[in-house]
Image: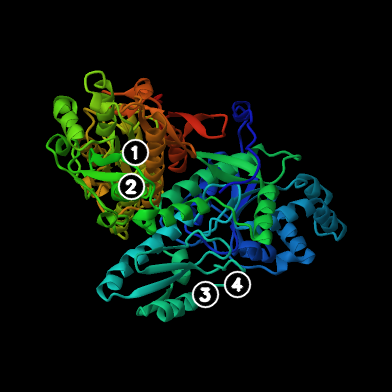
Amino acid sequence: MAGASAPKRQDTRKFFENLSGAGKSIAVLTSGGDAQGMNAAVRAVVRMGIYVGAKVYFIHEGYQGMVDGGDNIKEAKWESVSSMLQVGGTVIGSARCKDFRTHEGRLKAAHNLVQRDITNLCVIGGDGSLTGANLFREEWSSLLEELLQQGLIDEEATQRNSELHIVGMVGSIDNDFCGTDMTIGTDSALHRIIEVVDAIMTTAQSHQRTFVLEVMGRHCGLFSCSRLNIIIVAEGATDRQGQHITSDFVKDLVVRRLGFDTRVTILGHVQRGGTPSAFDRILASRMGVEAVLALLEASANTPACVVSLVGNQAVRLPLMECVQMVSMFVLETDMRLSFENNLSTYRLLSFRKADSELPNSSFNVAVMNVGAPAAGMNAAVRSAVRVGITEGHKMFAVNDGFEGFYKGQIKEIKWGDVGGWTGQGGSLLGTKRTLPGKHLDKIAEQMRIHNINALLVVGGFEAYVGLLELSAARDKYEEFCVPMVMVPATVSNNIPGSDLSIGSDTALNAITDTCDRIKQSASGTKRRVFIIETMGGYCGYLATVGGLAAGADTVYIYEEPFDIRDLQANVEHLTEKMKTSIQRGTGAQNCNENFTTDFIYQLYSEEGRGVFDCRKNILGHMQQGGAPSPFDRNFGTKIAAKAMQWITRTLKESYKGGKHINTACLLGMRRRTLVFQPVAQLRDETDFVHRIPKEQWWLKLRPLMKILAKYKTSYDVSDSGQLEHVTRVRPKDSNTSTAI
């Protein structure tokens, strides 16, 4: 979501020279409505706090627990947050607290914190919870003075606890907070909604029945959309006159005007329940670590901040500035927020205009899939086809990638042909890894036969290389002198020029869900370590980010070389954990020529003999299968729509004398912006031998993963506050160290 001023850059390198939480106490609480991923945030705060040497406390039952004190405020240990990642809700409890809204309640809360020397507070909740925390901080000095006058604390305690530092994280399934792209819980709630929509779709079609689904959302219309004969209504939806629109009202309207058999389903708190998605686990973990760093850095003059997600960066923004912007939007009922663009795209793709209303275009545009299947490809093709038709083009589908192209497997594709494609996995067009280089003449002939004026390619690394080959052959084949654009779609997320690819989020959720089940399979059994192999080739994205989401103990990837000493150190690390009552460990493994999955499995089995046993799991192609996640459906839809709009503009602006200016671009996500980049310019950013970009943003997440798995590391940070470099050393009581 938009809003708030730009995050302040800081000299974090200087700060980390003296990074230590020794002598400090941090308390973490969850407040207001629960949201999936809150537990991941609590876990990250606890482990990062302990890692830097601070004492960390749970405050159970939110602000009510802070007011009541006693056993509601307990010191947390490293093991206290084990096995929390996959649990929905909040295990430390949340409650609405009227007492904290009063001066007397806040005075009691201050007394309970001072008794434990807690002067650093991490609050996970919505805008009301964060506003209460800021008020508490503003009153802190006067509250301490009052406690001193009442004889409840002494002068020394007053001086020792003179400053209260507040950092917030937004936990809300509504995504209704300004300053952050996503709030903790939003993605998981979308997963619940999509699961229900997919399930109810079959019965709706079987009975020719219409369903009206009511979802949560208060004043935020994030979930308002419809799909075929399913209508989704946000609980806070209003008409243009501000009148409340209920699900029953919509049902009655459909029955009265259309005569359709209609049912109402209210999802309610189902949306808050269930295991958090991979995205929410990663988001919450990053925010939790950043929150601890912010508390350690805070001084007397540092305002309360909220940790937000902007693009792929965790940043700190002034808490009250963000809250005030939220209040302003709600009071004015002027919800001009980012999801309005999604609503516009939805309307564009859902309602076909009459032929007489379409622009007059003589252009033919072909769309195709290239490479391995990736969930979300079909959503992208559907979007491209319908946007193209809306803009007056004749759309052609190419089956089976470049192989189908040169074989002439090309036919016109209509609006109705792509109906229902959004939620289907795989590639309905068919996709292959074949490159065009050996068949350029035949492809040029097919483009001439079908008079193809532009080409949209949805695919992975082969699509990128294929586009390079086509553009390089333009001097020889005039047919290739047309606008060509690629949309990245691959579970490996290894395309230069884009931080994310269609399909990678679905694959991450498949990995995370499988790891959850694998760990659960060992519940109640003897100590066990799992060696899990993921896809990705030489790209360690799935292994690293999946390992972070699943709580893996270590992740081996090509990009971070390791040797036998590292493997031995990790075995000793797991052995030590098993001795301290940790019952299960996991290790996600990826690419090394000699240290294969089998080798690592055999090494762990031998070295762990007598302490733990070992199991091996190769996840394989299940990572490519299944229905696309909400993110991949939305990402595929939006990025393909933007690609088609670019094609239209380019065709109109550059068409001269029957020949187009040479354009061949990749549309990728850079931080939070979709950017068109000439593929020729991306050559220098590419390691073609290993099929990966030379620089990959997600490598900055690896230190975070290791810290949360209790590895001793030395580290530095980038100017955005993210941990950037790590040197892994052998666990405590070992004699040697190895730099990575």
Above/below status of 609 relative to 87? above
For the residues labelled 2 and 1, say whether their Cβ atoms are less than 8 Å apart.
Answer: yes
Q: In the displayed image of the protein, which residue is found farthest to the top? A: 475
Instruction: Find residue 369 and report its horizontal and vertical position in percent.
Output: 24, 41
Where does label 4 land, which residue? Answer: 243
Element type at mark 2: helix
**Taking the image as drawn, is residue 377 in sight?**
yes
Instruction: Find residue 70 and report its horizontal and vertical position in percent.
Output: 65, 64
Q: What residue type is labelled 3?
A: Thr
For the residues labelled 3 and 1, say whether their Cβ atoms are less than 8 Å apart.
Answer: no
- Could you tell which of marks 1 and 4 lies nearer the N-terminus? 4
**Taking the image as drawn, is residue 711 in sight?**
no
Element type at mark 3: loop
Where does label 1 land, which residue? Answer: 487
Looking at the rendered image, the disc whose residue lies closer to the viewer, 4 or 3, is 4
Q: Quadrant of residue 317?
A: top right
